[in-house]
Image (spheres, grey):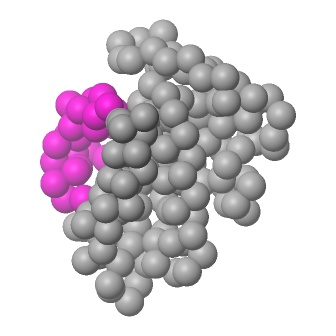
Amino acid sequence: MHQIRTVWIALPIVFGFVLGPALAASAPVPILLDTDMASDCDDAGAVAILHVLADRGEADILGMGTCVRNRWAAPALDAINTYYGRPDIPIGAINVNGPGLARDSVYDEYLAKNYPNRLKDGLKAPEVVSVYRKILARQPDHSVVFVAIGWLTNLQNLLESAPDRSSHLSGRDLVAAKV
């Protein structure tokens, strides 16, 4: 019980300290959200907060990614985005058969199967590092804020990524230039 209270208290504090100075700017802050959408409901709450910030013109949601090996996480995230009127937010998923934390989630599967979403099955989601590289390559230098909830596997994989069609920069150089 104490751990759950800590998460709910920490979530607004994290958003406040990390995003507060950036949100004070007049233009919406470009945000990439990386989440372990599966283990508990804090991720859905964080996505809701992010959508409210976007509704208020304080955030521009560039994309989202899931960092848990759960075939329902990406479609559940897409269902939440669709509910908030943003069905076109790019979503990437970690390879469900690759390395990383595997987490089942009854609520992710329920959302994915019972609410409108583009993906329907996370096995159809694009690979998250490719999504992040494509989004970052199109952004102005030093403009993007990464918000990570949970494991940092995707961010590590992004930093270790090689140049590709999206950018001639290595992952480390791309992040240094854009984030």
Q: Residue furthest top?
A: 97
Is residue 47 something one can see in this rendering? yes
Query: In the drawing, does residue 38 fall left or right of residue 100?
Result: right
| 167, 50: nearer the viewer | 50
Question: Is residue 45 magenta-colored?
Answer: no
| 138, 124: nearer the viewer | 124
Residue appearing at x 38%, y 89% in the figure: 26
Q: Position of residue 163 (x, y in %)?
A: 26, 37
**In this picture, which residue range is highlighted in magenta?**
151-179
Considering the image in quadrants, where does the N terminus appear? top left
Q: Residue furthest front?
A: 1
Q: Position of residue 79 (x, y in %)?
A: 71, 44
Query: In the drawing, does residue 92 fall left or right of residue 123?
Result: left
Question: Is residue 178 magenta-colored?
Answer: yes
Residue appearing at x 41%, y 84% in the figure: 27
Q: Is residue 121 above or below residue 85?
A: above
Q: Position of residue 35 (x, y in %)?
A: 44, 40
> Picture quarter containing residue 119?
top right
Q: Is residue 115 above or below residue 144?
A: above
Is residue 124 something one can see in this rendering? no
| 107, 166: nearer the viewer | 107
Q: How many marks?
A: 0
Q: Is residue 156 above or below residue 165?
A: above
Considering the image in quadrants, where does the C terminus appear? bottom left
> Picture quarter containing residue 110?
top right
Q: Position of residue 168 (x, y in %)?
A: 26, 45
Residue appearing at x 49%, y 44% in the figure: 42
Residue appearing at x 81%, y 43% in the figure: 116
Query: In the drawing, does residue 4 fall left or right of residue 105?
Result: left
